[in-house]
Amino acid sequence: MNEHNPIALELNKIQRAWLKEVSAQPQQRVVRMIIKPEEARVYEGFCKLESSAFGQLPEVFVTHLTSFEDEDTFSAAIIKDWLETYDNSEKLMEDLKNKHISFEWNPQLYRQALANNKGEPLDTTLLRMLDDFRQALPRDDKELVLVLLPRLVSDLRHLKQWLIALLKKGIPAGVKLLVFDHVGNEQLAIHERQFPGQLYSMHVPLELHNAIQKLAQSGNPNDPEIALRKCLFEMGKALQAKDLKLLHEWGQKALDYTQRSGNKGLFATTHIMYAGMLFYFKKDPLLPQLLDRGMRIAKQGSQQGDKACLPLLIQFYGYHGAYAQLRRNFEDAIEWFIKQARLAQEHQFNQQAMNGWYQAAELCRRKDGGRYYTVLEEAYLSGLNLQDEEISTSVYIYLLRDYYDYVHSKKIQDRINNIDEKMGRLFGENWKEEVDRIRKTRAPLMMPPQTMEEA
């Protein structure tokens, strides 16, 4: 690890705290790290580092991004992801053999358990798998840490119940589960009276803002990317202080630095970031100018083969839609969101396409009902080739839920069947209720900060 890198030093703080508070406590079974939301990327980096060959801690970390849908299916989902990861680790297994490191683990029992599963929870099977894997590790005293970083969590209360169920069954010695909670909004705290000594909560005070600022200002000050990072920090401070004059001062400096670089992607990026900050000052006349000019630069860059410019152009379309919505020009906003969706779809930026369709559909539903089902239908058709994971992790599930009501009322049976089959496979027989619940509990999709305030 680069000890001079400010972010690396923050990671090192987490490692030292873990070594002191967790590694020395073999009786612990569930470790809950309490973090600030803005620190999430640092902790994700910590988990990925420790799950790699460069990890510094004595335990073997395995990080899983498995989405949590419900407590009955989560263990099976983890087992499935675990086996897929293991199957894709042939080169690692070969390297171990070449180094004469013995690692013999037979996954067949767990493949059979998945194949024979009829919807029953596989909690006991998961615990047995973790224990078997730990025992197969080269050193007898090696501990295994399963890090749970779900891409999506449908209900934190149910995730907590799943943890309690595993604790009741008995998490094997030498196995720990690591989960994350947020400061001021702790959802996964479990009463220790039931499981004395097995639970541990830790919070590591980080100086993330200072670390990022040091990192942003390190390097050659004449490098346009370094100069831009410094400007963005100063712009952020001005925004926090609601000092529009200072924001414009640093924003203009950022534009000057990146224009001189000749890098259209960097220049367009500066425009969109500057414009994004001005959404907090809705009536500033520079906001639409930045969007127009930045979009032209991104379009030119894209035509000239700058690969960074196409995703920026898609973003500019969305920001134009957001700005039109803010000005209550709803018809224009809908058109911008549709243009965003179609351009993203054309170039296989599937998540961005779905976001554009969702924004357009929601605005039609509230402001232009005559276009609502036409937009929903185009959105439905645009997502027909999405993979299951792309569907379950995007707003496409809401588009499908709303379109289903329409085709059901029109008795369009082939589309009813198609949506039922797809969503039933992903969310179970009661998929409509599940999606409704997810929509209520999941944070709504936003463009810039004030986009959705016009009802």
Image (cartoon, rainbow, N blue to C red):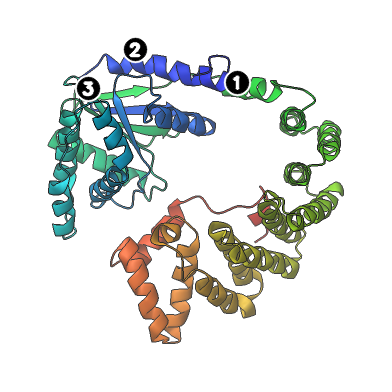
Q: Residue at x 68, y 55 (%)?
A: 310
Q: Residue at x 25, y 42 (%)?
A: 161
Q: Residues within 10 Å of mark 1 (few under 14, many from 20)?
A: some
Q: CA distance from mark 2 to mark 1?
A: 23 Å
For residue 211, the mark is 1
Does residue 259 lie above or below 11 as drawn?
A: below
Q: Position of residue 339 (x, y in %)?
A: 68, 67
Point out the frontmost of discs 3 and 2: 3
On-image quarter of the C terminus: bottom right
Q: Amino acid at mark 3?
A: Lys
Point out the frontmost of discs 1 and 3: 3
Q: Residues within 10 Å of mark 3 (few under 14, many from 20)?
A: some
Answer with the quarter of the image where residue 257 lies.
top right
Quickly name the residue at label 2. Answer: 20
- Which mark sits nearer the N-terminus, 1 or 3? 3
Answer with the quarter of the image where residue 106 lies.
top left
Quickly name the residue at label 3. Answer: 142
Q: CA distance from mark 1 to mark 3?
A: 33 Å
Q: Residue at x 23, y 27 (%)?
A: 29
Q: CA distance from mark 3 to mark 2?
A: 17 Å
- Which mark sits nearer the N-terminus, 2 or 1? 2
Q: Amino acid at mark 1?
A: Ala
Dot 2: element: helix
Asked if labels 1 and 2 touch by Cβ distance under 8 angstroms, the answer is no
Dot 3: element: loop
The residue nearer to you, when weighing 412 against 406, is: 412
Answer with the quarter of the image where residue 323 lies.
bottom right
